[in-house]
């Protein structure tokens, strides 16, 4: 049980490292956000679960479960808010980007609003 | 054996926090820095749990919970500020 917990914590820390490496190497803010949010979410969940399994006598399991649920709920929310803000203030995309549907929809909305105003 | 594997996991998480810190220094725009800061917060929650398990202090888990809460509120507030919302 304890050995399995330590190995799960090791896998989680490898996910954390890969997320930080993607944060450093990706070309664009949206790619960086994807690497830095999804990989670190999975990595921290695995690390916390592995810690609770490896050292069950000195980590309270109920609090660890609450912390894992909290990370699952709040991490995508903050990432979504940041991505929306970054697209809104017009940070340039990477040169290899092939599709940007949000900009097209925003332009369509602006056209329909000005049409109604006139 | 268990302790050695667990300490290697903690060392890898510490290396991850250093990589995210490099991106926070280099980042061309403000949103890049905030993304790196968010990732650093998530990794440091894991490191606080590592310290709680290694030093056998259960009270550190409460500190990790409060740290995550404050980080979430801060990131959402900065996103609204970048969007000219507040």
Image (tube, coloured by chain):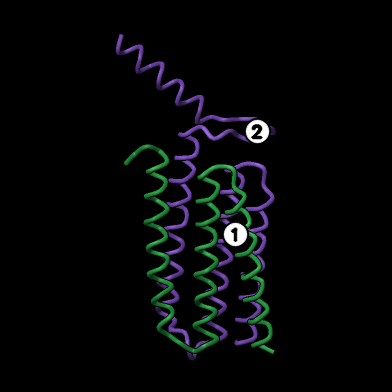
Chain colours: A purple, B green
- Which chain letter matches label 1? B
Residue lying at 49% horizontally and 43% vertically, measured from the top left: A83
Q: Is residue A30 above or below residue A69?
A: above
Task: Assign the C terminus of chain B to one quadrant of the image.
Answer: top left
Residue A5 x %, y %: 60, 81
| Label 2 residue SS | loop
Residue lying at 34% horizontally and 39% vertically, measured from the top left: B85
Outermost residue toward the front? B25
- Both marks 1 and 2 on one chain: no
| Disc 2: CA contacts within 10 A as few (<14), some (14-19) or many (>=20) | few
Task: Assign the N terminus of chain B to one quadrant of the image.
Answer: bottom right
Residue A32: mark in rendering: none
Outermost residue toward the top? A118
Q: Which residue is mark 1?
A: B21
Residue B56 x %, y %: 49, 89
Residue lying at 42% horizontally and 53% vertically, measured from the top left: B75
Residue lying at 37% horizontally and 37% vertically, measured from the top left: B84
Q: Is residue B83 above or below residue A103?
A: below
Please tell me in which quadrant of the rendered image residue B6 appears.
bottom right
**Between residues A112 and B3, which one lies in front from this camera angle?**
B3
- Which chain letter matches label 2? A
Q: Is residue B23 above or below residue B29?
A: below
Q: Which residue is mark 2?
A: A97
| Disc 1: CA contacts within 10 A as few (<14), some (14-19) or many (>=20) | many
**Between residues A52 and A25, which one lies in front from this camera angle?**
A25
- Left or right of B8? Residue A47 is left
Residue B61 x %, y %: 43, 78
Q: Is residue B73 above or below residue A50?
A: above
Closer to the eye: label 1 or 2: 1
């Amino acid at each position: 049980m304890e050995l399995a917990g330590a190995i799960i914590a090791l896998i989680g820390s490898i996910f954390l490292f890969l997320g930080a490496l993607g944060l450093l190497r990706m070309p664009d803010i949206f790619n960086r956000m994807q690497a830095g949010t999804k990989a670190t979410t999975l990595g921290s969940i695995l690390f916390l679960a592995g810690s609770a399994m490896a050292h069950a006598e000195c980590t309270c399991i109920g609090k660890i479960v609450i912390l894992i649920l909290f990370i699952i709920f709040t991490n995508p929310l903050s990432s979504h808010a940041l991505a929306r803000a970054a697209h809104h203030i017009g940070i340039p995309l990477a040169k290899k980007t092939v599709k940007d549907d949000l900009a097209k929809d925003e332009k369509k909305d602006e056209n329909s609003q000005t049409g109604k105003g006139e | 054996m268990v302790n050695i594997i667990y300490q290697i996991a903690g060392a890898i998480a510490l290396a991850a926090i250093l990589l995210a810190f490099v991106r926070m220094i280099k980042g061309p725009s403000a949103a890049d820095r905030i993304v790196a800061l968010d990732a650093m917060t998530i990794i440091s929650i894991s490191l606080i749990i590592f310290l709680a398990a290694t030093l056998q202090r259960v009270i550190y888990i409460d500190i990790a919970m409060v740290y995550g809460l404050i980080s979430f509120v801060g990131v959402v507030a900065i996103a609204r500020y970048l969007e000219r919302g507040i």
